[in-house]
Image (cartoon, grey):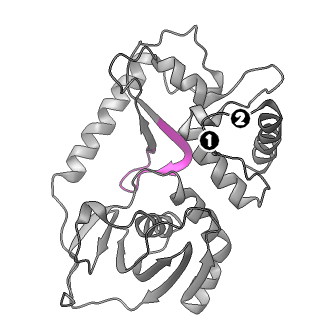
Amino acid sequence: MKHSDKPLFSFPAAGVRRGYVLILQGILREKGSELLEEGRVEFDLKVDKRGYPGSNIFLIDPVNSLIWIEKYSGDPTRFPARLKACARALWLHGFSGRFHITHRNGKFSIVTLPSRQRDPLPQPDPERLEHLDHFYSLLENLEEKVGGKHQLADCSGRMAWPDQGVYHFFEGGELRQQSEGMRVVRVGTHAVSRGSRATLWNLLSAHRGHIGGVHEGGRNHRGSIFRRHIGASLIHRNNLDNESWGQGSSAIREVRDREYETEQIGRAHV
């Protein structure tokens, strides 16, 4: 396919912040200064699953919170996930402009590229910001009705939870670019399979962890993908030794005890 000077398509920079996005963001905390000074950085993700290889040029647009892809001949819905995760991690770390990102066998290369002043960025849907403002206004109305945001650590099953619902997580320090309000960092639901009897609190309690008991603050991350992703990022960021994390659908007591030690170390480093 002939190279085009104009970006082909885009995806939201502020997408779901989890998994490899968190891991790559942690790496960039260490490698970011090297990228700024030398314009190039290489690193190994050090994971068992090598993922799909890929190489592409990304244009990080901080004004519209979008990431544009300049050259891609395949199906946009099947674009390599790790390349997208790396571009999102760059945006989260405050980078903007053009970058050539390459991934192969778990190894990444990021190279800064000069901007193209002659080519204006494609404009996003003019109604996009309006839709976002409406979404956050609905959350503000809900917040007033329930008496403010809830801290998950302070929640319990005795509260008036609906049996089913959608939850939105916010995080301190994560703000919307177009306003000073807090940004939604995770959206989740539950009971997605037919006939499931799981309730909203079932899932939230799994994300929260145990209150008291032998493993206070811990929980089965194999039953909470949210805890699994956060734990994986902490393990990588703090160079912790826990090869069993995220492996299999269950674990023996000895493994769970060892994983709990990792959770406590991770909490101390947050």
Which residue: 79% across, 38% down?
255
Q: Secondary structure at mark 2?
A: loop
Q: Position of residue 100 (x, y in %)?
A: 42, 84
**On the image, numbered disc 2 is attached to which residue?**
251
The quadrant of the picture occupied by the N terminus is bottom left
Residue situated in front as seen by the camera: 12 or 235? 235
Q: Which mark is residue 248?
A: 1
Q: Is residue 38 above or below residue 207?
A: below
Mark 2 surroundings: few (<14), some (14-19) or many (≥20) residues within 10 A: some
Q: Is residue 210 above or below residue 182?
A: above
Q: Is residue 153 left or right of residue 61?
A: right
Q: Position of residue 212 (x, y in %)?
A: 79, 20
**Number of marks in the rendered image:** 2
Q: Position of residue 145 (x, y in %)?
A: 39, 17
Which three-letter amino acid code belongs to the residue tagged 2? Ala
Q: Is residue 231 above or below residue 88?
A: above
Magenta region, main secondary structure: strand
Which residue: 64% across, 84% down?
34
User: Is residue 179 shown in magenta?
Assistant: yes
Q: Is residue 85 left or right of residue 11?
A: right
Residue situated in front as seen by the camera: 218 or 78? 78
Q: Are marks 1 and 2 in contact (CB under 8 Å)?
A: yes
Quarter-wise, where is residue 8 in the image? bottom left
Residues shaded magenta? 169-184
Which three-letter amino acid code belongs to the residue tagged 1? Gly
Q: Is residue 157 above or below residue 140?
A: above
